[in-house]
Image (tube, helix red, strand yellow):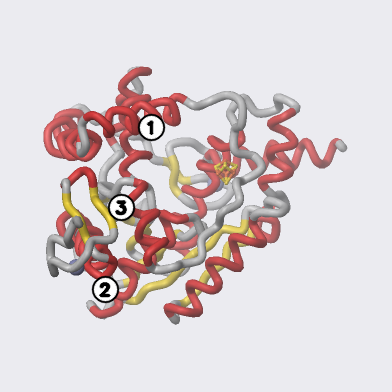
Amino acid sequence: MPRCRVCRRQAWIKIPWGNTWFCKEHFIEYFERKVLRTYEKYVRGAHKRVLFAVSGGKDSIAMLYSLAPKLLEKNCEVSVMFIDLGIRGYSEYALKIVENAVNELRIEFKIYDLREETGYTIDDLAETVRSNIFRKSICSLCGTIKRYVYNYVATKYDYDLVLTGHNLDDIYGFIMSNLATGNINDLIKLKPYIPGSKYFVAKAKPLFFNYEYENKLYVTVKELGIVIQKCPHAPIKEESLVMSFKKELYELEKKHPGIGLMFVKNFVKNIQPYITRKEPVEKIVKCNMCGLYSSTNPCSFCRIKLKLEKIFKKS
Ligand code: SF4
Ligand code: ZN
Ligand code: ZN
């Protein structure tokens, strides 16, 4: 009978990458310590107002429950932001999940309602993508919107750090696909922590070194509510390059447990400093429409908004 590494009682789960068994209690302890360690190791500067971007999925819920209480103990002001993307049959459910979490943890809650703020929803945008009006996929446009909103909400309410719940599998897939396509510029910003500037709020990914399965186990053992529905706009047929590499990683891990973690750690330690030295000086301009900073004027968010306004006016 396998035994917990810490207390020697009957184990509940094996963590393959460390070839370690834990009981439920000590798995929770291990997980929370790991997330806090990533945060403390990489997040620089005394951030006192921290905004958790929470979608209701397993990763962001795991990030919230494991880290928010620890930051509150450190006297940080902590809030949760939820973006209501207006996806029918999905966003309402996700909002309820996040609301329950926020009530349970007694944390301040900010909701950004895309329809109220801009007049359109992701459902509207998906409709135009289907008619080939945008050259990008709906998920890529949705990603642009989310990144903009994180910075917008944080700037508006004076937060100095935004946390997002990307997991190690996502990071691995992103690194591999960008290496494959030679898109090195996108890898320059792929760090567990990006300091703030006078233009942008600091951002961190405390689950950078957490396998997706670890986050799943954490929400399972803590019996936390998470969104289980799939977004109706998630690609069904065609598989993205990131997804293909993530699947490759699952196969690799069966033969070489921990290979993904080793890869991502080495990327941060050995490759990231090298490509950062080659970082091109990015042009930053003020967007005439929203007043925030971006590499283009209007910014990508306002360009999407402009395009949609034109389309809806015509129809
Ligand atoms: Fe947005 Fe795509 Fe995620 Fe749906 S699946 S929430 S459209 S990024
Ligand atoms: Zn134990
Ligand atoms: Zn703008």
From the viewer's side, name the closer residue of 137 and 226.
226
Q: Identify the mark nearer the N-term, 2 or 1.
A: 2
| Quadrant in which the N terminus appears | bottom left
State left or right for residue 161 relative to residue 309.
left
Q: Identify the mark nearer the N-term, 3 or 2.
A: 2
Q: Which residue is mark 3?
A: 207
Q: Amino acid at mark 1?
A: Lys
Q: Tag 2, which secondary structure?
A: helix
How far from the left and from the top, in percent, is residue 166?
37, 48
Q: Which residue is mark 2?
A: 70
Q: Is residue 72 above or below residue 272?
A: below
Q: Is residue 82 above or below residue 254?
A: below
- Identify which residue is drawn at 32% across, 66% down: 66
Q: Amino acid at mark 2?
A: Lys
Alpha carbons under labels 3 and 2: distance apart:
15 Å
- Identify which residue is drawn at 28% across, 66% down: 24
- Identify which residue is drawn at 56% across, 51% down: 290
State left or right for residue 43 relative to residue 222.
left
Question: In the picture, residue 26 is in which quadrant?
Answer: bottom left
Q: Which residue is mark 1?
A: 246
Q: Which mark is residue 199?
A: none
Ligand 1 within 8 Å, label 1 CB: no
- Identify which residue is drawn at 72% across, 29% down: 130
State left or right for residue 296 relative to residue 162.
right
Q: Identify the mark nearer the N-term, 1 or 3.
A: 3
